Amino acid sequence: MGPSAMLFRRPHVILYISLALAVAISALTAAVILQMRQDALAIARDSGHNIALLVERDLKHNLDAYDLALNTVLHAYREPSVLALPATVRNALLQDYVATTKGMGSIFLTDENGKVIFQFGKRMPQPASLALNELFASQRIAGDDALHISQPFLPLVEGAQRSIAVSRRLSTSDGSFAGVVVATLELDYLREQFSGLSLGKGGEVTLRMLDGTPLVRWPVLDTPIPDDRDTPAFSRFLLSSRGDFIETSHVDGQRSWYSFRRVGNYPLVFSVALPEQQIFLRWRLRAWTIGLLAAGLDLAIIGLALLAARQMRKRTALVSELREEAHTDALTGLNNRRAFDRRAAEEWSRTQRSGEPLALLMLDIDMFKAYNDHYGHPQGDVALRLVAQTIGGLARRPSDFAARYGGEEFVVLLGDSDLAKALALGEQIRAAVQARSLPHERGPLGILTLSVGVASTSECSAGSLEELLEAADGALYRAKSEGRNRVASYSADAVAAH
Ligand SMILES: Nc1nc2c(ncn2[C@@H]2O[C@H](COP(=O)(O)OP(=O)(O)OP(=O)(O)O)[C@@H](O)[C@H]2O)c(=O)[nH]1
């Protein structure tokens, strides 16, 4: 049997195959969607890293330049030969050094009393109006001349912008306080730098001091930059010099992907936050599209398989119906002549091999032409059905095979039956038909009867199926000629007459 024939016999197999296919498609789709999600996160992560890295390097570079400017001024004022120069020449010289720093508000140097000795910049702070008293006081008591970054402040100068001050302490040779050198950095400059970053919708960058003081945020908020020093996100900034993590923002309650870096050795931390919703926005759209397509495909496959299975079942039912019809006599419901021929040939071969006897009954309704003529053809059909029913009801063993041989003639094939058994069944059938007492005016007894011819290989030496048929037919002829309504065997001695 070929694979397609096997499928036709088992339509549920196609359903199982389609289900397996649908499951495989779903699993593959889920794997692709998950991979795409990871890719989306990886892209956001990379872009966060890159932004943090580039900005951190730029900030560090800028602060290093500030430090260099402070040191230049500092060293110049420790150098007697520079100090000997006229103030205008000295200042012009120094200006050239410090003018390269970006975002510079101003740079100035004071003596130990806060008196400005050198100053340069767009907005010159007046010593009396310095909002840097605190810085000055803390540098006075500081034990070293390390770089100090101040809290943000607004210089008391017209047009000044929020700034931070980067300062170093001037010490005399014995280490006592000799003044400060201070450079102010306008935070707007940094904001401007940050504004050029491409962060996507909802993304933000923030520069904070390590004590949590926010300095610059982009995009700019309408409200002051939220102080988030007590948030879980900020506490993670303190754990290491760089890293990334997902955390819920305390500002808008959104989960965001954070990437952060400390700015060199300065007490500053720069962070990038990209909202998770935004990171997965495109992925979500694609995932839905792919997911729906896959679901549609699954449904189509299962639907088609259901349809095909239904068609196959219909076809199988039709085929068996046709097969049944091809072997059944339409009028009586008994096996037809073709079915008999096939079965008889099979049985003949089987008994030839096994040596078991094979018997045959030929049955013919008596004076049926007269019955038809008298009662009409339709009633003749009724009688035929009744006789067929009687024969079928008695030839019930699995090895019995009853068929309509043609017209008003029937046959019964009896596997593993000798003549005695066959005669007994013939007699049983004859008696049963007689017992029905169907009126037949022209019949031998005034009721419908039949004659039976019997032959069995146990008694006759039939060399072929045809010879066995001929023997049974001959016996039937004898039953008819000897008066009808009787059973006769192929030999004259075995006739049972009634
Ligand atoms: N109603 C009906 N009659 C059928 C059918 N097939 C055959 N016959 C009739 O059966 C009759 C057979 O008659 P005959 O072969 O002459 O034999 P008989 O009249 O039975 O006489 P004996 O066999 O000698 O007893 C014919 O009249 C056929 O028309 C059928 O399907 N339906």
Image (cartoon, rainbow, N blue to C red):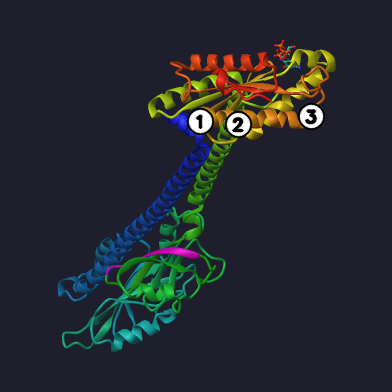
- Disc 3 crowd rating (10 Å Cα; few below 14, some 14-19, many 20+) is few
Q: Is mark 1 within 8 Å of ligand 1?
A: no
Q: Quadrant of residue 54?
A: bottom left
| 141, above or below 493, in the image | below
Residue 70 rendering spot, x and y as whole percentages = 27, 71
Is residue 73 covered in magenta? no
Q: Which mark is residue 425?
A: 2
Q: Which mark is residue 417?
A: 1
Q: CA distance from mark 2 to mark 3?
A: 19 Å
Counting residues from the start of the chain, the first of labels 1 and 3 encountered is 1
Question: Seen in the image, is 468 located left or right of residue 334?
Answer: left
Q: Residue at x 42, y 46 (%)?
A: 28
Specify the quarter for ligand 1. top right
| Residues shaded magenta | 255-264
Q: Which mark is residue 437?
A: 3
- The reply to whether callout 2 and callout 3 are in contact (CB within 8 Å) is no
- The reply to whether callout 1 and callout 3 are in contact (CB within 8 Å) is no
